[in-house]
Image (tube, rainbow, N blue to C red):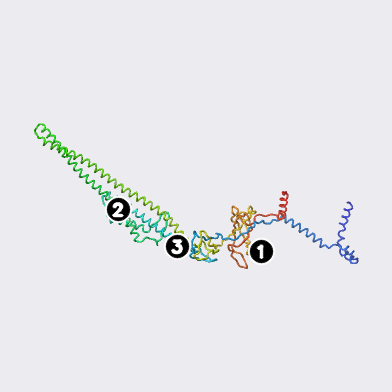
Amino acid sequence: MTNFFELLREAWRERGKLGDGSKQQGLSEFMPAALELQETPPNPLVRWLAWTLITLFILTLLWAIFGKVDVVASAEGKIIPGSRVKQIQPLDKGVIKAIHVKEGQYVKEGDPLIELDRTITAADQARMQQELHNASLNLAGSEALQALIADQQNTAEKNSQQPKNQQHQKIHQRINQHKKPVAASELALVIDEKLTLSASEILLHQQKTWEQWQQYQAQLSSLHSALTKAQSEKIANLETIKKLEQTLPMVTKRATALHSLYQKNMASEAEYLELEQQRIERTQDLATQQQIQQQLIAAINEAQQQINALKADTSSKLLAQIADSRNQLATITEELVKARDMNDKQILYAPVSGYVQQLAVNTIGGVVTEAQQLMIVVPEEENLEVQVMLGNQDIGFVQSDMPAEIKIHTFPFTKYGLIDATVTHISDDAILDEKLGLVYAMHLKMHKSTIRVEAKDVKLIPGMAVTAEVKTTQRRVIEYFLSPLLKYKQESIRER
């Protein structure tokens, strides 16, 4: 070992002589080929190449240890409008009457798209409108009768009577006020001007109300006549009673005096008996008239009670009719609102400005079903979004407001570049995809809606396929190479 180190030191001292290549080269030219090859020194380029490779390896290793790269979560999806695609669907089944658009056509908000046949819905609306008019006029008639009864009671208290022409005029005014009925105030429904009642219909309701009033007046007049008759008989009977009460004491006194004379044989028995008979008859007549007076008082009370009962019963019935009519008005009005809404929705309008796509019908007279998708309208907007399906393995690292880059499949990113975006929303629950399994819907907002292609800006449109790459974290380069090995080692150790 000592000799080895001495030789190494001697070689190190003689290292300068080994580099004298010019002398060695000159000597080697006169040597045989084998000796020339043996004595020729090695080319220094190989040594430099070896040192260069070693240096590059060390630098690469240092870069792999200390250098970091971005870790991205990649997800595929498509571009969608900011306010989503609008589906056009009918509320109920119907028959196509007109198609006002074609595939790819641009429409403005409120433009008609498809018109369905409105024969049935228009008939339902007209029927409900007519029922509303009739119910309103019935309410007007009941209110008119109630007002006339109240006015009659007020005039009766003032000992006056309202002329019949004024009564008829009141009914006429009440009916005319409801010529164009107004629905319940809380519904605030505007009645169609085309369905106002004709003059003959109004006159018919006026005549009906007047007949009801006349019938009530006839019953009331009959009871008043009976009351007046009983009151007159009571007055006459009262006069008779007063007359009997005044004459009976005198007849009684005369009979008593004559009886004293008869006992003294100063008057005949016939005279006494005749006067006594008059006294008895007048006494009986007074009792009879007093009994009749009580009967007349009872008849008067009964007639008054019948009058009051008729008024109360009529008022009660009118109030019940008014309440029923108002409830009926409210119910019919709600049904009319539904009928008008159904009739109006037979014409499908564009909810937003945009382009018609996926037009599913093209036959006039064709039948559509409830909630059938007839077409979609893609909104024309500057704000476009990207919807992608984020894998379950990346959901734990992606959050809202993270920066991202969008690759448009139509335009290769190596040539046309990327579009910056920001994560705006991630679904709270996973969605089961047949191909990808459990994924999460993620929305990103693009910072611009155009891409530079051949020196001009090309507008991006909904439906373009994209790939979104979200920058989540950073990791060392060496981890990228060691991670599969560590994973394999960890899993293989646990296997049986």
- Circle 2 — which element? helix
CA–CA distance in space, label 3 to label 2: 43 Å
Label count reads: 3
Residue most extreme to the right: 31
Which residue shows up at 35% across the image and 50% down it? 317
Q: Residues within 10 Å of mark 1 (few under 14, many from 20)?
A: few
Q: Nearer the viewer, residue 304 or 184?
A: 304
The residue at which mark 3 appears reads as 119
Q: Position of residue 26 (x, y in %)?
A: 89, 66
**Relative to 183, 37 lies left or right:** right
Q: Residues within 10 Å of mark 3 (few under 14, many from 20)?
A: few
The residue at which mark 1 appears reads as 414
Labelled pair 3, 2 in contact (Cβ < 8 Å) = no
Q: Give the label, 1 or 3, closer to the camera.
A: 3
Q: Earlier in the sequence, mark 2 or mark 1?
A: 2
CA–CA distance in space, label 1 to label 3: 60 Å
Q: Position of residue 292 (x, y in %)?
A: 22, 42
Q: Position of residue 183 (x, y in %)?
A: 40, 56
**Relative to 389, 116 lies left or right:** left
Work out whether 494 lies above or below 407: above
Q: Amino acid at mark 3?
A: Thr
Q: Nearer the viewer, residue 283 or 37?
A: 283
CA–CA distance in space, label 2 to label 1: 97 Å
Which residue shows up at 46% across the image and 59% down it? 342
Q: Nearer the viewer, residue 19 or 423?
A: 423
Q: Position of residue 475 (x, y in %)?
A: 69, 54
